[in-house]
Amino acid sequence: MITCLETPPDYDISLYQFYTREPLFFMPEVIINGPEGRLECRYMPGPDQNAPTALILHPEPDKNGTMNNRVTFSTYKLFQSRGFSVMRFNFRGVGRSQGVFDNGEGELSDAATAMDWLQSQHPGSNICWIAGFSFGSWIGMQLLMRRPEITGFISLSPPASTHDFTFLAPCPASGLIVHGSKNEQVPHPKVDALIEKISKQKGVAIDINLIDGANHFFSTHLDEAMSSVSDYLDRTENGAVMPTAD
């Protein structure tokens, strides 16, 4: 089911609007059948049926994370502005999505279902990205291991201190990690160690951009985080030319 619904003016998006002075746009609401009932989504198709696709995942559902989180929303808007068909959604138990928090296992199933729906709308697209913030990046990297069609990833503040990333040994696709030098929740040496462990796959290059002074939430450095993502998409031509390593 698709209806036209204005993005809800909650606290996070109000902050986004305050900082960027951009108007809110009408974004189609999509309700899809998830593993535990309905999943509440926002979806914007690209300019053509074969546009590249991107799925954006939000932070910790058990700590009030939603698809309207300012980092998640800004990432969604960035991919949309570049001509992607883009989707974000609330994990089970968040907003109007049914179910209860499942510590990652169920949320991974939610993400796989959302990606299935997005790809079903664009069967001719040959470029697919996964992007996530905090908990969303952990789920996104797990999905990356299970979906060989994923072209690249964007991981913002991956929770390397609290979540197990050993499943990424090695990482199967190139991508970008954006992290803050003042991230007290996940000190950047933890992320450096993570990259060292997972950068073993031949032909795969993992870039990291350490943003000076930024905390876990990019509270005063969101523009820099989004610029980093945009620059990476420029360099990869939106995924048409992914970097490789020896």
Image (cartoon, rainbow, N blue to C red):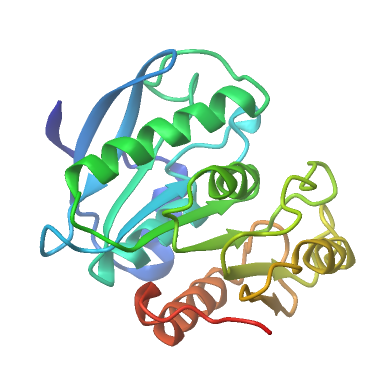
Residue 129, by quadrant, is: bottom left
Image position of 37 with respect to 154: above or below: above
Image point 44% across, 41% down: which residue? 67
Residue 6 visible here: no
Image point 64% across, 67% down: which residue? 177
Q: Seen in the image, is 168 located left or right of residue 153?
A: right
| Placement of the C terminus among the 4 image quadrants | bottom right
> How far from the left and from the top, in percent, is residue 161?
85, 49
Q: Seen in the image, is 114 located left or right of residue 24?
A: right
Image position of 49 with respect to 112: above or below: below
> How far from the left and from the top, in percent, is residue 6?
20, 41
Tag count = 0
Image position of 198 with respect to 89: above or below: below
Residue 179, by quadrant, is: bottom right
Residue 200 visible here: yes
Image point 32% across, 68% down: which residue? 21
| Placement of the N terminus among the 4 image quadrants | top left
Image point 36% across, 82% down: which residue? 237
Along the viewing direction, whichever of 176 and 225 lies nearer the viewer: 176
> How far from the left and from the top, in percent, is residue 107?
55, 28
Q: Seen in the image, is 49 located left or right of residue 137?
A: left
> How far from the left and from the top, in percent, is residue 36?
44, 13
Q: Seen in the image, is 87 located left or right of residue 132?
A: left
Image position of 22 with respect to 240: above or below: above
